[in-house]
Image (cartoon, helix red, strand yellow):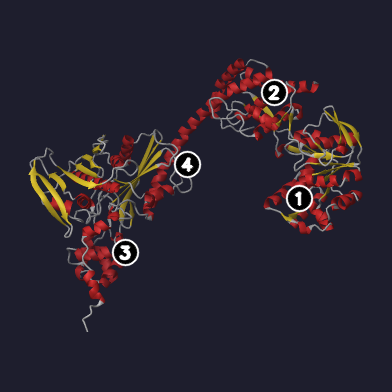
């Protein structure tokens, strides 16, 4: 009998490791690279996010240069340059040409980028769509050399492939410049790069952004404040904010040798007493080695931890825009009649501190008979896709805007000349997917959003009633003036008196009655 | 001619009153008696509906009143100029088109729909005391009549007994009609033209020496005025034949007591002596009509409640019995259900029997 392979053996010949970049090509949509126009936007977004984050690390007012050049019908060259701290030579290849490499994934801190898939995904996309390497120049200080790199990614090993590495002259004192060539599509409108840059300028009023679109149009978004945003601090995870899997991973990765030390060192808000209480509760010695716990013990410990009373997480880790600066941002980019903004106190969902800010611009040049424009932001980053799936949209549509004198049918966006801006700042924004387009609907988050919207809505409603009433009153008086010739002519037919004389007299009466009319509600009898 | 001059004078007076206010630098004001149930009084002595003393004061320089004010004066001016001064008559619809136009510099029409100009005419009636007919405005022709009667209308002699199957169609203004010969014992008025055609074909009016008169649905002013003139000039009894439902009751009620909308004209329109011949709720048992029941709707019950609470029905035991039965049956019957007993049952049996036995409701 010939030797038959078992099914498992047969399968084994087909099973092989899927490289991270293969995974990427097959799952582009998860990362936001599913179509050419979106790929262009994602690349700009990742580069701009990195630049703004880098500038805030260095506490320098950002001065960004963003340019898109069209090479041919479907190919674009994206250049983003900042005045940030620059990157040390050894790290440049890893940061730009190794997927899932970065400092942000492992910390809880309010950052623009969060998952670290970031810029290297754009580099990979560029490589896959054009075959061209990405060009980087970075310089860390006045007396330091500027390093020029051309990089590709070794897609099998997920390792950087350095094509060029040399020192160049660069006039900038410090900063980073990236040039990425990619297949893309440049569109105008709601989900365009233009819109992204503009919205970024609204929520980053401390940044100056020079933007050159493919049609060579140059827009400079000026700085509205010299004040840097409050620095956001890094915090340890809050025990009530983590899941069992994460907890087990933390047990495994800790550098401490006792459970007691692990609790106190790796979490926020756990003191010696709470640590002992949790150990007693789960009947596990506080001196055991965290790396040697069985999975059953780990689960017991986790349960005890979840039921322990623990203070809410510290809130100084957040860096909101602030009510005043948000208003300044809106004022400089949106031409309206009335602005109202609010910044809610810090709140907590699943152990994660967060803060909601809302701003509304109303009237002026904004279109009257369409739905309001909704601008969504997470950690100062505009969210342009998947509006319908976002908690922000849910909070806005479930608010009764009729109470604030905007039109609204059912639970749709209200209609009126308004822009509604909602910003969520958090150490961990719960996106619905890796492409970071929409915020997930947690009750605590929705509640805070609604409260902020209502607060702004009340002020907006008061404004509308005040101004609209005055305007309507004027329109009514204008109308009465138009009625005068009609009445004069009918009275002339009835009485054979001269129309012109009657008209003049009626105008005199109207002048006298004007003060009464302004008070009048107009009730018969 | 005297009448026409009086109408012109009345409308002119109205205009002069408004001008007086303007001359005094006052906000022009129209006092309009309110035409609604809240201002309708049932006069127990005359047994008719009358307008009460409640008035609305309408100011031109008041946003809520301005348009109505303008409509009323505009309609008055058009009636005076286009109708009275040229001696012409027109319909309500014509008046609507006479005043309909856009106020220059706005997107507002003086009137958008006919009910607005109709209302202005009613306002003018209560303000000036003139009737619609005196203002040369006619309603649509509606209704037919047949019988041993000869009249004179605009110089033409018309014999109502020689008009075949169609009869004489009743104009909306019957003021100028002269009765030359009236030979009848009573008038039978019915709300359905189809029933009138049946009775006319059976020559019911010849056999029973009566006048047959029908409208289609609501009784117009012309018909009401014609009935009133027959009663006042010839003392003819009038019997009303309607469907056995609350709307039939109300048709009878309007002829007898007057209507809320035209309470100001009751004097010239109501006939307190009319009697209701049928269909009564008792007829249903007597003539076995239950199998022709049509179910009542919620709105019908609401209407029964309303009508039964009107002052002029509230204390009428006979009618309250009828309302009670309507609610019990939860159904109504039409006049034509009598045809199930034979096509001429109504003319040969039902009506003669009822009249002979004086089986009426009052």
- In the rendered structure, find residue A306 and report the number of the disc placed on it: 3
Name the element at disc 2: helix
Would you place residue B265 above or below residue B288 in this image?
above
Task: Give me the residue at 62% from left, 23% from top.
Answer: A487
Instruction: Give the mark nearest the N terminus, 4 or 3.
Output: 3
Between tags 4 and 1, which lies in front?
A: 1
Image x and y of residue A11, in percent:
25, 72
**Are discs 1 and 3 less than 8 Å apart at CB?**
no
Image x and y of residue A155, in percent:
18, 57
Identify the chain of the residue marked 3, using the numbered disc in the image.
Answer: A
Labels 3 and 2 within one chain: no
Q: Which residue is mark 4?
A: A407
Between residue A179 and residue A279, name the one nearer to us: A179
The Cα atoms of the two marked residues, 2 and 4, are separated by 46 Å
Q: Which residue is mark 1?
A: B245
Q: Which residue is mark 2?
A: B82
The Cα atoms of the two marked residues, 1 and 2, are separated by 43 Å
**Are discs 1 and 2 less than 8 Å apart at CB?**
no
**Left or right: B33 in relation to A353:** right
Name the element at disc 4: loop
The Cα atoms of the two marked residues, 4 and 3, are separated by 45 Å
């Amino acid at each position: 009998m010939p030797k038959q392979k078992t099914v498992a053996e047969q399968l084994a010949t087909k099973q092989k490791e899927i490289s991270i970049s293969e995974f990427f090509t097959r799952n582009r949509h998860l990362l936001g690279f599913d179509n050419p126009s979106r790929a262009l936007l994602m690349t700009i977004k990742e580069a701009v996010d990195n630049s703004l984050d880098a500038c805030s690390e260095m506490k320098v007012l950002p001065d960004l240069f963003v340019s898109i050049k069209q090479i041919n019908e479907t190919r674009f060259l994206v250049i983003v340059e900042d005045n940030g701290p620059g990157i040390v030579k050894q790290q440049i290849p890893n940061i730009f040409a190794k997927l899932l490499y970065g400092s942000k994934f492992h910390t809880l801190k309010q950052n623009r980028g969060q998952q670290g898939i970031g810029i290297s995904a754009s580099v990979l996309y560029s490589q896959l769509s054009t075959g061209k390497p990405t060009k980087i120049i970075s310089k860390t200080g006045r007396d330091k050399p500027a390093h020029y790199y051309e990089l590709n990614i070794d897609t099998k090993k997920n390792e950087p492939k350095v094509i060029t590495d040399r020192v160049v002259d660069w006039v900038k004192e410090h900063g980073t410049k990236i040039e990425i060539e990619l297949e893309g599509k440049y569109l105008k409108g709601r989900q365009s790069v233009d819109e992204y840059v503009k919205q970024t300028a609204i929520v980053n009023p401390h940044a100056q952004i020079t933007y050159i679109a493919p049609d060579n149009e140059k827009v400079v978004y000026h700085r509205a404040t010299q004040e840097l945003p409050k620095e956001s601090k890094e915090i340890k995870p809050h025990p009530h904010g983590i899941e069992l899997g994460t907890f087990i991973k933390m047990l495994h990765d800790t550098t401490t040798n006792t459970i007691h030390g692990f609790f106190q060192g790796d979490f926020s808000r756990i003191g010696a007493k709470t640590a002992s209480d949790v150990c007693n509760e789960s009947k596990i010695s506080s001196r055991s080695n965290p790396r040697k716990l069985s999975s059953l013990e780990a689960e017991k410990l986790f349960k005890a931890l979840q039921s322990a009373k623990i203070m809410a997480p510290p809130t100084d880790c957040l860096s909101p825009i602030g009510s005043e600066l948000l208003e300044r941002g809106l004022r400089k980019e949106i031409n309206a009649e009335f602005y109202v903004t609010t910044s809610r106190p810090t709140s907590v969902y699943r152990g994660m501190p967060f803060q909601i800010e809302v701003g509304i611009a109303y009237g002026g040049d904004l279109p009257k008979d369409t739905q309001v424009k909704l601008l969504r932001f997470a950690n100062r980053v505009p969210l342009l896709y998947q509006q319908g799936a976002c908690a922000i949209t849910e909070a806005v549509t479930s608010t009764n805007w009729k109470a604030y004198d905007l039109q609204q049918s059912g639970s749709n966006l209200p209609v009126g000349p308004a822009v509604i801006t909602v910003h969520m700042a958090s150490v961990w924004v719960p996106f619905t997917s890796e492409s970071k387009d929409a915020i997930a609907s947690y009750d605590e988050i929705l509640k805070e959003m609604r409260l902020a919207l209502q607060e702004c809505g009340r002020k907006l409603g008061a404004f509308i009633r005040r101004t609209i009433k005055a305007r309507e009153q004027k329109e009514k008086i204008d109308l009465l003036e138009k009625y005068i010739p009609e009445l004069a002519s009918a009275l002339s037919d009835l009485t054979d008196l001269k129309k012109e004389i009657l008209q003049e007299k009626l105008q005199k009466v109207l002048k006298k009655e004007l003060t009464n009319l302004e008070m009048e509600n107009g009730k018969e009898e | 001619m005297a009448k026409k001059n009086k109408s012109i004078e009345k409308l002119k007076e109205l205009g002069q009153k408004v001008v007086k206010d303007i001359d005094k630098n006052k906000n022009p004001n129209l006092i309009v008696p309110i035409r609604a149930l809240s201002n309708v009084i049932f006069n127990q002595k005359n047994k008719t509906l009358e307008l009460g003393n409640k008035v609305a004061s309408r100011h031109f320089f008041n946003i809520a009143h301005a348009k109505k004010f303008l409509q009323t004066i505009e309609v008055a001016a058009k009636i005076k100029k286009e109708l009275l001064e040229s001696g012409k008559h027109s319909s309500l619809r014509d008046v609507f088109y006479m005043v309909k136009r856009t106020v220059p510099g706005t997107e507002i029409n003086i009137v958008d729909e006919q009910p607005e100009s109709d209302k202005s005419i009613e306002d003018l009636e209560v303000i000036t005391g003139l009737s619609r007919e005196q203002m040369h405005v006619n309603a649509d022709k509606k209704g037919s009549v047949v019988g041993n009667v000869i009249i004179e209308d605009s110089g033409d002699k018309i014999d109502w007994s020689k008009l075949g199957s169609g009869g004489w169609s009743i104009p909306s203004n019957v003021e100028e009609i002269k009765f030359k010969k009236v030979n009848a014992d009573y008038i039978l008025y019915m709300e359905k033209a189809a029933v009138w055609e049946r009775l006319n074909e059976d020559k019911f009016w010849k056999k029973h020496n009566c006048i047959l008169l029908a409208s289609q649905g609501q009784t117009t002013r012309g018909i009401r005025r014609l009935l009133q003139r027959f009663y006042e000039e010839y003392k003819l009894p009038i019997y009303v034949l309607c469907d056995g439902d609350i709307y039939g009751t109300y048709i009878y009620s309007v002829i007898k007591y007057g209507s809320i909308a035209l309470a100001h004209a009751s004097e010239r329109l109501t006939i307190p002596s009319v009697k209701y011949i049928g269909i009564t709720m008792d007829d249903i048992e007597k003539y076995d009509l239950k199998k022709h029941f049509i179910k009542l709707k919620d709105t019908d019950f609401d209407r029964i409640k309303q009508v039964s609470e009107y002052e002029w029905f509230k204390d009428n035991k006979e009618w309250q019995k009828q309302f009670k039965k309507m609610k019990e049956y939860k159904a109504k019957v039409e006049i034509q259900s009598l045809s199930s007993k034979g096509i001429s049952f109504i003319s040969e049996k039902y009506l003669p029997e009822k009249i002979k036995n004086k089986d009426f409701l009052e």
